[in-house]
Amino acid sequence: MDEHRGRIDRWRSTGDATARSAGSPGLKATLMPDDSYKFYSGILPAERVHQAMEALPDVFRGLLGDCIVTAYYGFGCELHPDLQYKPMQVGTKWIHRFITDSITQGIVIPGHSDFSFTAPNERLEILYCHESDIHLSGKDDPLIEQFIATQAFSSIRFRTRAEIEANGMKPPH
């Protein structure tokens, strides 16, 4: 694990892409490929990412009701790489406990770990990215718009890939 942490620390400090995956066969960079997300938040302070994680249970219950969502631990999570990107079924009734425990136990470090959630039928996908931003995607555009409009997320400026590129900025990878 120390070798894995060393690769993560080197990657975080230098941006060295080889440090990201060296020695970790099958380690994915993200759940959503570069071009699959529809909205991107831009870089947020880690505390704001943490707040957005803590707000997710109420938002999910309000938009989805009582259902099962799929959660994933990803890059930067403090657990064995073989346990990353394994689907975990989490009910909206107890997702708050799952998120809180993941942060409290140090598995997820807001702003430094990929932590994602997918609504049933891939209607909405949220990736709290290790680069301290939030990616949104999914098959249900009205649901995505409702998510962005919730009180918990409306203060975050989400942009489309086209908006980012039109402003001469480079979209996240």
Image (tube, rainbow, N blue to C red):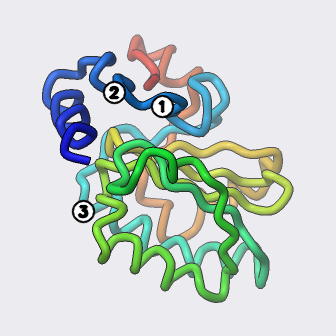
Of badges 1 and 3, nearer the viewer stands 1
Q: Is residue 60 above or below residue 30?
A: below
Farthest bottom residue in view: 93
Give the residue displayed 65% in from the left and 64% down from the top. Answer: 88
Residue, disc 1: 29
Point out residue 55 in the picture as x, y percentages from the top left corner: 47, 74
**Secondary structure beneath disc 3?**
helix
Q: Earlier in the sequence, mark 1 or mark 3?
A: 1
Cα separation between marks 2 and 3: 24 Å
Residue, disc 2: 20
Q: Nearer the viewer, residue 160 or 112?
A: 112
**Secondary structure beneath disc 2?**
helix
Cα separation between marks 1 and 3: 23 Å
Q: Earlier in the sequence, mark 2 or mark 3?
A: 2
Q: Earlier in the sequence, mark 1 or mark 2?
A: 2
Give the residue displayed 24% in from the left and 62% down from the top. Answer: 47
Decide: few, some or many residues near mark 1? Use Cα within 10 Å; few <14, some 14-19, many ≥20.
some
Decide: few, some or many residues near mark 2? Use Cα within 10 Å; few <14, some 14-19, many ≥20.
many
Q: Nearer the viewer, residue 14 or 156?
A: 14
Task: Look at the numbered discs 1 and 2 and tell me whether their residues touch, using CB distance below 8 Å.
Answer: yes
Q: Amino acid at mark 2?
A: Arg
Left or right? Give the position of 6 relative to 72. Answer: left
Point out residue 38 in the picture as x, y percentages from the top left corner: 64, 35
Residue, disc 3: 47
Point out residue 33 in the picture as x, y percentages from the top left corner: 61, 28
Point out residue 171 in the picture as x, y percentages from the top left corner: 46, 21
Left or right? Give the position of 165 relative to 62. Answer: left
